[in-house]
Image: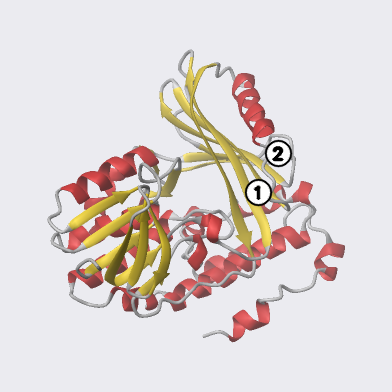
Amino acid sequence: MSDPILDLALVGGGLQNGLVALATLAARPDARIALFERGAALGGNHTWCFHQDDVPDAARPWIEPLVDRSWPGYHVRFARYERALSSTYACITASRLDEVVRARLAVSPNASLHLGSEAVAIEPGRVIVRARDGGTRDVRAATVIDARGPDRAGGTGGWQKFVGLELALARPHGLEVPILMDATVEQLDGFRFVYVLPLAPDRLLVEDTCFSDGARLDAAAMRARVLAYAEARGWHAREIVREERGVLPMTWDADVTPPEPGLVTAGYQGGWFHPVTGYSFPIALRLAAAVGDAIGRGEDAAAAVAALVPAHRAQLRFARRLVWMMFRWFPPENRAGVLEHFYRLPEDSVRRFYALALTGRDRTRMFLGRPPRGLSLRRMFSAPAPAAEAEAEASP
């Protein structure tokens, strides 16, 4: 026996579907939504960051409750270059996402949350869900949004690997703004940097990250490097509050999956992500706002997402070409020069890059001036073009 038809069946309780739920209920509070997540809470164990200018005014009322902390700027550090940037930077934690989305669904008359529920079959307009007790449900919806995470993504390329520790410190750290990239550390396993978020006067999230050729994650070694980095700066940890880790694909051949009637494949598996940085918030927000606006107007959600595909595909092609150049033209130990070169761009270009919203002028600026340090001409002229390049250029 199937359930009554819904406006949306959301499969996966991460950032993407959390934003879709909030956007849709902001536009139409009586929308019929069911969100299915196999875990015990929404958001997993993640932190998502973004620039405040990534949020359009219309979305601020339902985005602002998600913000756990914001700062008036951030720093980047390289061996030969440092910079303070003034773009307001903000973070969303998994616990805040869980709290806000759970509360919003609870007060919506036709919305429901189903934790401990795993999709065993998905097709346009239909999801078969299995609960922890083994029982199944046949769920019908005008649109299914499948956003089950990066472990379902494919493609050829490198990997962004990270281990982050949230540290409670013995005394205040004195850090006023985040360090988005400290690449003054020893370069190991490709391009390595440390990422630091000051969450409270005596609490930091310190993350060791590598852009690597292989997907193997040595969590113990990265954890030790995080603690050593903190100790070297006088940040003595009295407690490790939590740990987050991940292995994200940095692909140069993945393409966006166009929606079909009744089904949107979102997130990493659908190509709705930033292949260079792994940043997902601005892209997830654009998709969520399109879905919410469409349902608010009584229009088809999948068609609204389809309208985003041409612009997103064009941005994705350029970004994945950058990934290919970084991994093919630069030896692993010299990849830091690519990011050092990038951070000399105007600040607005840097922000648009993270948002995957580059203009033609931004793209041109990336290739002006002297090439990044460490460029290998031998690798540059011997590297074959990505296998998907010709096919991608021929795609609509």
Q: Which residue is mark 2?
A: 79
Q: Quadrant of residue 208?
A: top right
111 to the left or right of 351: left
377 to the left or right of 231: right
Measuring 29% from the left and 73% from the top, which residue is drawn there?
Answer: 301
State whether residue 223 appears in this view: yes
- Front-most of 233 and 312? 312
Mark 1 Cα-neighbour bin, 10 Å: few <14, some 14–19, many ≥20:
many
Where in the figure is residue 302, as x and y percent of width and height?
34, 75
Query: In the rendered image of this protein, does residue 389 appear above or below residue 186?
Result: below
**Is the N terminus in the top left, top right, bottom left or bottom right quadrant?**
bottom left
- Secondary-structure class at tag 1: helix
Where in the figure is residue 20, as x and y percent of width and height?
31, 60
Q: Quadrant of residue 143?
A: bottom left
Where in the figure is residue 207, as x and y percent of width and height?
56, 36
Measuring 70% from the left and 59% from the top, which residue is drawn there?
Answer: 326
**Alpha-carbon span between mark 1 and mark 2:** 9 Å
Q: Which residue is mark 1?
A: 340
Badge 2 amino acid: Ala
Cβ atoms under marks 1 and 2 closer than 8 Å: yes
- Front-most of 92 and 130? 130
- Front-most of 274 and 9? 9
Badge 1 amino acid: Glu
Measuring 60% from the left and 80% from the top, which residue is drawn there?
Answer: 392
